[in-house]
Amino acid sequence: VEEPDPSTFSSAEAYVVHTAWLKAHAIEVPTDEWILSADTMVEADGRVIGKAATREEARELLSFQSGGVQRVITGVCLR
């Protein structure tokens, strides 16, 4: 699933719930089966921490978060 731009949502919570919904609806399943999907994001110092694209970026993100307070937000969708 191509994830949308987080900055276009009113809140981090709205973003993760919407992305979980997209994931749940991206596949077809028989009507008698359930799909559980989830999406998680991290905020640190008011900044959304995305997935690192390189090892160097991963090091920078970990350094930025070190010793600080993070907020982990998960949205789920049961379909």
Image: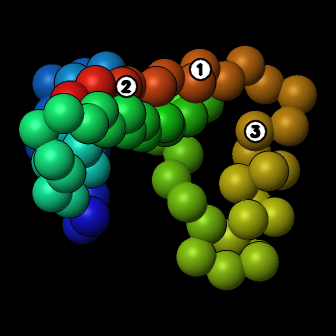
Residue shown at 72% from the left, 19% from the top: 69
| Residue 12, quarter of the rendered image | top left
Q: Nearer the viewer, mark 1 or mark 3?
A: 1
Percent position of residue 9, x then y: 15, 34
| Residue 28, quarter of the rendered image | bottom left
- Image quadrant holding the C terminus, namely top left
Q: Residues within 10 Å of mark 1 (few under 14, many from 20)?
A: few
The residue closer to the viewer here, 15 or 44, is 15
**Helix, strand or loop under label 2:** strand
Q: List the residue tagged with mark 2.
A: 75
As drawn, the label of residue 71 is 1
Q: List the residue tagged with mark 3.
A: 65
In three-dimensional space, the C-alpha distance between marks 1 and 3, rounded to whole angstroms, equals: 11 Å
The residue closer to the viewer here, 25 or 56, is 25
- Image quadrant holding the N terminus, namely bottom left
Q: Nearer the viewer, mark 2 or mark 1?
A: 2
Residue 18 shows up from this direction: no
Q: Residues within 10 Å of mark 3 (few under 14, many from 20)?
A: some
